[in-house]
Amino acid sequence: MQILGIDIGGSGIKGAPVDIERGEMLTGRFRIPTPQPAKPKSVAETVAEIAHHFDWHGPIGCGFPAAIQHGVVRTAANIHKKWIGVNASNQFSAKTQCPVTVINDADAAGLAEMQFGAGRGRDGVVLIVTIGTGLGTAIFTDGRLLPNTELGHIEIDCEEAEKLASDAVRKNEELSWQDWAQRFDRYLTRMEKLLWPDLIILGGGISKHHAKFLPYLTVNAEVVPAQQGNEAGIIGAALAAK
Ligand code: BGC
């Protein structure tokens, strides 16, 4: 079965048709810069442009950087505040004329990693952390997702974790890999004390640089880089719409 997967991010909205049995994108991804300001109407129009690009008339899955309860956006940490309370599924369905499922972006990446990537076949507690503009989290127990964990917002020494240790912070503050890794390690250590994961998968664009920061991490759990890189968001969004 083919589903159009779309990953909505702060700087780009990316999509590709996905073969959900094989967990593979069927074409290269198509990317449009996220409209600014990223209000509901303009984002929905961009989603429709992506569907139109692929001449798409079937189901669509969208990963969105917020807690999503039954299609409704509940939080707005790094997105326009106008999204709160909006039924994103309905907005995107109306604009694309296709059935659209919307889930949290880190949950989407987690689904892809658990089915086709670093978490494949892994039981127990698996924590996925996506490191980008924010810190996204997904938790699986015996392969089942607990949706909408927003654990990038826990406080560490009176500071929100994603304001201390996201990839955006690393770039903005021009931190060395070691300095950033030590901050991120404080975050992971806290996660470990709260959740006792058997496996931690680190995703987001930064995962391709894993050799530069994994050696500085001190948690006891097994820590591995995501295997699907930037495609996880698109593939997982499609899986969510199955
Ligand atoms: C949001 C999460 C999202 C993460 C990664 C956070 O700021 O609250 O919902 O998963 O960023 O995009």
Image (tube, grey):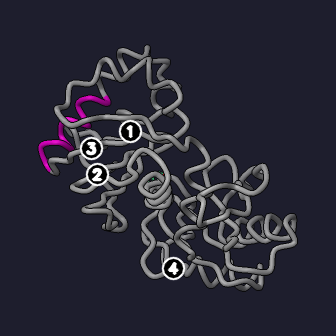
In this view of the protein, which residue sits in the foreground, 107 or 123? 123
Dot 1, crowdedness within 10 Å: few (<14), some or many (≥20)? some
Which stretch appears magenta?
184-194
| C-alpha distance separating marks 3 and 4 | 29 Å
| Circle 1 residue | 163
| C-alpha distance separating marks 1 and 4 | 27 Å
Query: Residue 159's x, y, as percent?
Result: 27, 39
Which disc number belongs to residue 199?
3
Label 3: which secondary element: strand
Residue type at tag 3:
Leu
Which disc number belongs to residue 71?
4
Tally of numbered discs = 4
Label 4: which secondary element: loop
| Circle 2 residue | 126
Task: Write the residue at 50% across / 40% down.
Answer: 227
Q: Are marks 2 and 3 in contact (CB under 8 Å)?
A: yes
